Image (cartoon, helix red, strand yellow):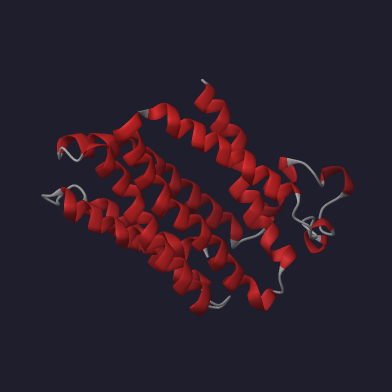
Amino acid sequence: LVAIIATAAGAPFRAASAAAIPNLVDADDLAWANGLLGTAFNLALVAGPFMGGALVAVSGAGLVFGVNAASFAISSAVIAKTSGDFGGRATSARISEGDRCTVLAGFRLLGRNRLLAPLAASSALAFGAFGAALVIDPALARHFHAGSVGYGLLTTVWGGGAVIGSLTAGRIVTVARAPVAVVWGMLAMALSLGSIVFLPSFALIVAAGAIGGVGNGFVFV
């Protein structure tokens, strides 16, 4: 129950932080900024799961949850001290005063945009299925006797691929190339996740995760 509450409370952060980026940088720097944000996030995916798996193996889960809680507290303090125009003057001008701060306003904007609406729908489908697939990770680690460290490696290597994808996409993706980047990124994730069914060893499954991570980095940017 506590985990559900914590996840629900934290879920808006990544969406809100990504939505704030266009209001904090010039349009020409948007891909670079998204790439930098994605790189920072994915570097955490590289270090966090591996360290967490090692800590669980050494001292149990209690210390890991304590470190996790402290990290969120530090993060909230840093964000609270961050200055900048997060509000988005360009977006706010297109939303009526009464709807400016409602979820319905966001859905109305999506519904009127013939490009964003299918992108949002396909992303919800893809990442919803991705979330469902994550529940198999502990079973994979147990099946191959990889332990908590091996379980952490599944996310660590995915995060390493995503760092490469974010850095690369931040340098080469433009507005004109964005649709191609999303398509190829999704295909890379599909190849990575689909191959798990056929790969005979845990090492190959972990390596395949790097391919999916690269694709994830491109999609995020």
How many labels sit on residues?
0
87 relative to 125 in the view: left or right: right
73 relative to 99 in the view: left or right: left
Q: Which of the pair 31/82 is nearer the observer?
A: 82
Residue 183 appears in view: no
Q: Residue at x 45, y 74 (%)?
A: 168
Q: Position of residue 221 (x, y in %)?
A: 53, 65
198 relative to 148 in the view: left or right: left
Residue 135 occupies which quadrant of the picture? top left
Residue extending farthest top: 1
Residue extending farthest left: 200
Q: Residue at x 63, y 43 (%)?
A: 74
Q: Which of the pair 176/143 is nearer the observer?
A: 143
Q: Residue at x 34, y 57 (%)?
A: 189
Residue 220 appears in view: yes
With respect to residue 111, does 101 lie above or below?
A: above
Q: Position of residue 5 (x, y in %)?
A: 57, 26
Q: Which of the pair 91/202 is nearer the observer?
A: 202
Residue 90 occupies which quadrant of the picture? bottom right
Residue extending farthest front: 58
Q: Residue at x 46, y 57 (%)?
A: 42
Q: Position of residue 125 (x, y in %)?
A: 45, 46
